[in-house]
Image (tube, helix red, strand yellow):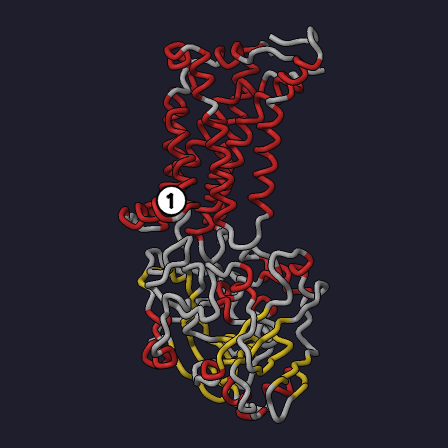
Amino acid sequence: MEPRARHRWQRAAAFVLCTAPLLKLAVDAATHGLTANPIEAVLHRLGFWTLTLLCASLAATPLHDLAGLAWPVRLRRLLGLFAFSYAVLHFLWYLVVDQGLEVDLVGVDVVKRPFITVGFAALVLLVPLAVTSTDGWVKRLGYRTWKRLHRLAYAAALLGVVHFLWRVKADTQKPAIFAAVVGALLLARLVPPVLARLVPGRSGP
Amino acid sequence: MARWRPDVQEAEATPEGLWLRRREFLRLGAAGALGLAWPRRPRAASGPSGTALPVASRADRAGGEAPTPWEDVTGYNNFYELGTDKTDPARLAGSLRPRPWTVTIDGEVKRPLTLDVDALWKLFPLEERVYRHRCVEAWSMVVPWVGFPLEALVRRVEPTSRARYVAFTTLLDPQQLPGQRRAVLDWPYLEGLRIDEATHPLTLLAVGLYGRVLPGQNGAPLRLVVPWKYGFKGAKSIVRIRFQETQPATTWARMAPAEYGFHANVNPEVDHPRWSQARERRLGEFLRRKTLPFNGYAAEVAALYTGLDLRRNY
């Protein structure tokens, strides 16, 4: 397959995979697969997929730098935009469906409850990243500035994990797994520069 | 072998189509999620199952509200000894063997008892009580319990004058309760009541649901039901009931003392630090409803707490 066609297929496959959780929600909703408290179940699932897709988008760079894979980088924008979309759906679900559009109460939550404060902060951080995700914005900002701006994704992922960790009542297993994954993905970014310093002339820009 | 080069070229090369397509998937996502996760009424209801219990009397103490369907009462549970997801207990309850089952009632009593759970409930006429059940997580249901008033048992064992509290202990057995293999909480689960709470006529020891023997996921074979308190006060799969002079340590209050207290009375005015307790979602309903003081049982129980600062004693 010629590269352009292959890239199109990869994007199409990633697109389908990223929408699969919504499809699964639809199927489960129709077959009573969302527990006796479907509003809560949907809220939790949307949050789960936000974090999962954030991790997937953060995996592109290490997969490129450490494993030499190019295709994850090509899908990074799509993954990031899907992560943002799930984050928006998660928040809207909480605001509109879970809280019945009681904007005042949600405002109190955002200010008063630390786990909601950090979750909201993560969502806010993702907004400029989604807005500047186009090729046009990369050119307008210049690649260096754009790249620096998009490091906000690290902060958003960390805040997202804290949001999850502070939400659970006692069982921290799932948020701990996300914390380990995000931690590993961020640490992996240090490997190439450290290697370059340890082994001069081995590689590097 | 690691290759290190700036990853600009591939990202730059991603074609124009995506920006257009994002609206498409945002729309799709929004429509999909909003349209599809509506709460629906019970699945092709299988209905109550299990051994029927001889129920001598019935009382609706939930203001005429229809009980939450059997499938939801037995399929959506907080029983961390059988897993921390709401659907885990129903799935894992098979490992719990609720019969034969020995219960010990001891401590500051004149006539301590150690007997089989079926011998225990046969000492008292069984009653059905339909109660509101309010979880500390701000969801609630309506449950037709079958059991006997704890008060009747208290009278039978004759507490001494030193019996000021009653402590309840859940079974400790990681074979039967696989959730205990992880130290999510400090096992075994401990709960407690003041003696006046324990002898209040609303306080129930439940052995059944919907006229049937209590399923494992609901705390078989014997559990505590205190309808004006948050659900976590209702110790499940009880093996020991101990009367004592001092206030017993209780599991959640030990785990997070800023979030869970010994009293745990349902109180819309005192928030859990991480969420409001002013409203709750009744399972099966779409909009949250206002939470009632003492879960709607204030007329009967508020007098127990006269002079007690309910903000500090949450």
> For the residue labelled by badge 1, is the local secondary structure a helix, a strand or a loop?
helix
Q: Residue at x 51, y 54 (%)?
A: A169
Where is residue B136 shown, x and y percent of the image? 44, 62
In the rendered view, would you say A51 is above or below A169? Answer: above
Q: Residues within 10 Å of mark 1 (few under 14, many from 20)?
A: many
Q: Residue at x 45, y 64 (%)?
A: B135
Where is residue B140 shown, x and y percent of the image? 42, 64
In the rendered view, would you say A199 is above or below A125? Answer: above
Frontmost residue, A189 versus B116? A189
- Dividing the picture into quadrants, the one containing residue B175 is bottom right
* Quadrant where the image shows the N terminus of chain B: top right
In the rendered view, would you say A63 is above or below A103? Answer: above
Q: Indicate the amino acid at tag 1.
A: Trp
In the rendered view, would you say B245 is above or below A67? Answer: below
Label 1 belongs to which residue?
Answer: A93
Q: Residue at x 37, y 28 (%)?
A: A127
Chain of residue at mark 1 = A
Where is residue A38 shown, x and y percent of the image? 44, 52
- Dividing the picture into quadrants, the one containing residue B282 is bottom left
